[in-house]
Amino acid sequence: MATIRVRNTNEVIEGEAAVRAFLTANDVYYDHWDVSVIPAPLQNKYDLTDAEKEEILASLKGYIEDLSAKRGYVKWDLISLSDTTPNIEELLQKFEQVHTHTEDEVRAIASGSGIFVIKGNDGYFDVILEAGDVISVPEGNPHFFTLTDERKVVAVRLFIDPAGWVAHPFYDPAFQKA
Ligand SMILES: [Fe+2]
């Protein structure tokens, strides 16, 4: 279950009802998948071959197809990030810049954890995600993604535009790094 930390006030929001209410008020889509459908040897595995990635996507096919039918995604893939990822520092630096997209950015956490930092109605807030959490940042909404202290995640990405992930930098003097 996701947890929220509001950067301006350090308020922490926990518990399904409160988290859903906060995210809905900020136009952020949230859902939860049962990731125990992923074959056990591939749960919490971060060094994945292409075949293993396909196997994980196949196990989540029902969820992926339902969400795509509802929200218009035409393409999906699986990304894995951990300390064994080549250029992990470079990748994180690239991700940790506030930016926007011309479509919503949806991620379903298959293993590990991650943080979306999102510009909301009253400043930035962090959504700390764990396995099973599904989130979508609205089109055009400033945000970025980073890892938690465990520094590992496997996530499904879904796209409306077949071109995939295209970021537009968003310079925001009001943003403060925590
Ligand atoms: Fe993004």
Image (tube, rainbow, N blue to C red):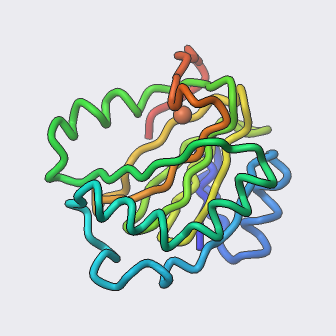
Q: Position of residue 8 (x, y in %)?
A: 63, 42
Q: Position of residue 23 (x, y in %)?
A: 76, 55
Would residue 46 appear left or right of 53 to someone viewing this image?
Answer: left
Q: Quadrant of the N terminus?
A: bottom right
Would residue 176 appear left or right of 174 to someone viewing this image?
Answer: left
Q: Position of residue 136 (x, y in %)?
A: 67, 48
The structure residue drawn at horizontal position 78% and vertical position 48%, both measured from the top left corner, is 71
Q: Position of residue 73 (x, y in %)?
A: 68, 44
The structure residue drawn at horizontal position 72% and vertical position 58%, both measured from the top left corner, is 67
Tell me which corner region of the image, top left, top right, bottom left or bottom right, holds residue 159.
top right
Q: In the figure, 70 relative to 132: above or below?
A: above
Q: In the figure, 57 relative to 171: above or below?
A: below
Tell me which corner region of the image, top left, top right, bottom left or bottom right, holds residue 87.
top left
Q: In the figure, 172 relative to 78: above or below?
A: above
The structure residue drawn at horizontal position 58% and vertical position 30%, both measured from the top left corner, is 162
Would residue 176 appear left or right of 86 to someone viewing this image?
Answer: right
Residue closer to the observer: 52 or 31? 52
Tell me which corner region of the image, top left, top right, bottom left or bottom right, holds residue 5.
bottom right
Q: Quadrant of the C terminus?
A: top left
Residue closer to the observer: 126 or 66? 66
The structure residue drawn at horizontal position 72% and vertical position 66%, both measured from the top left corner, is 19
Please count the marks in the image.
0
Q: Quadrant of ligand 1?
A: top right
Q: In the figure, 60 relative to 103: above or below?
A: below
